[in-house]
Amino acid sequence: MTIRKQLLNKYINKSSLFEFHRIREIPRLFIYLIIALLVNSTVNINCGGGSIWQDAINNFEYLYERGDFIESKKAAEYALELARETKKNTKSRLVESYINLGMADISIQNLESGEKSLYKALEILDSKKGENHRLYAVCNFHIGHVHSLKGDIPKAMQYLNSARQYFLENKDLQSDDYAKLLEIIAQIHFSISDYNGSEKHYRESLNIREKFILDKQNSLAQCSNNLAAVLRIKGELKESEHYTKNALEIWERIFSSEHKNVGIGLNNLGVIYKHQGRYEEAEATLSKALFINEKCLGANHIDLAPDYNNMAQLMHSKGNYTPAESYYQKAINILMQDEEGYRFEIGQIFANRGELHFSTGNYKKALDCFSDAIDQISFSNVEQKSAILKSMANRRKQIEEILSYDFDNK
């Protein structure tokens, strides 16, 4: 018996549970960064009349800032139609309208359509031979955002650096556009696990928003929430809690206590409480978040998977293994609706289930879960997966050693 305990203690708690510390912007999952890029690309063009077109642009900006992306696309399409009919400042209006349409499409996951609109705007700008340089900068950083979402980081940085150069040279460092540019760069640093770089750029953006862009409260809350998520990953839980609560206060004030963004913020706060060992507060907070998100999103929505995974991890940490298993299974069932798109996340949840079964002494099930986890992640489209696969393979080997050990003859 002593040998058995020594062997099991050798391998216990060698692997932490996976909380999906990887940015996945389209669709938005697991880290709960609000990465929908609620950019109001305000160009401030003197249109000389055209109040109907300007009203359409204003309506787009209002809807987009609130996160009503489908409606904002309709507003952008209407503004584009009006721009095509106008006879004054036509090119400038067309460019802004195409940029806005591109932004809306990106936010509802139509990357190809969004990219097409942005390159159309750039084509019009090129034909003007250097006029409206600010429009070039705005268009460039949105194109850079598209390439970052498609995984082409070098090309993304090429466009982002070009845009940033304009803002630096013209000392235009207090605008919403510049703040959003910094946030896109922060997200790229996050995607390559450079959390210090991500934190630096989020802090710079947040400082700009708090001092100079007070009319865009939703964007301010999002930036605060994003910074909180980075700090949480770095283990700076007290400060992460502070910024998460700041975001929640804004969302509850400008929306309602049961808005989808409040659900996201509460989920993040519950995870922080779990890390702090405040399990009762964590359970109450995560339960409220789950109630809001189920109500806003509907049953079996793909974005509920992280909620179930987080609740499962909490139950696991508390030793409530039966509900933990149920929540893990719910998360897997939801993601299996699009298995090809979510193999990486499915693999992480299988690994979490493996740790759960290890905790209960069911090593055969634990081994099966880690085998499933490795299979899913191996076939995922995530490029940086070698480290996690190595970790899981080591864990599987440890469990195989336990299962193969002949305790009766020792």
Image: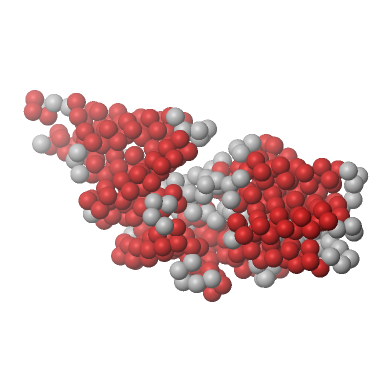
Image quadrant where residue 401 sits: top left
Q: Nearer the viewer, residue 3 or 116?
A: 116
Q: Is residue 26 left or right of residue 2?
A: right
Q: Nearer the viewer, residue 341 or 219?
A: 341
Residue 38, percent from left and from top: 63, 58
User: In the figure, 223 relative to 258: above or below?
Assistant: above
Give the residue at x 57% y 53%.
Answer: 35
Give the residue at x 37% y 31%.
Answer: 374
Give the residue at x 50% y 44%.
Answer: 22
Residue 86, percent from left and from top: 86, 58
Q: Is residue 59 left or right of residue 267?
A: right
Image quadrant where residue 359 sits: top left
Q: Is residue 116 left or right of residue 265?
A: right
Q: Is residue 220 left or right of residue 320?
A: right
Point out the image quarter for the N terminus: top left
Any part of residue 238 in sight = no
Please say which color scheme the image uses.
secondary structure
Any part of residue 70 in sight = yes
Point out the image quarter for the C terminus: top left
Q: Nearer the viewer, residue 367 or 115?
A: 115
User: In the figure, 397 relative to 51: above or below?
Assistant: above
Residue 190, percent from left and from top: 56, 46
Give the residue at x 39% y 51%.
Answer: 300
Q: Farthest residue to the left: give it.
A: 408
Image quadrant where residue 362 sits: top left
Q: Farthest residue to the bottom: give it.
A: 253
Residue 60, percent from left and from top: 69, 62
User: In the figure, 91 relative to 385: above or below?
Assistant: below
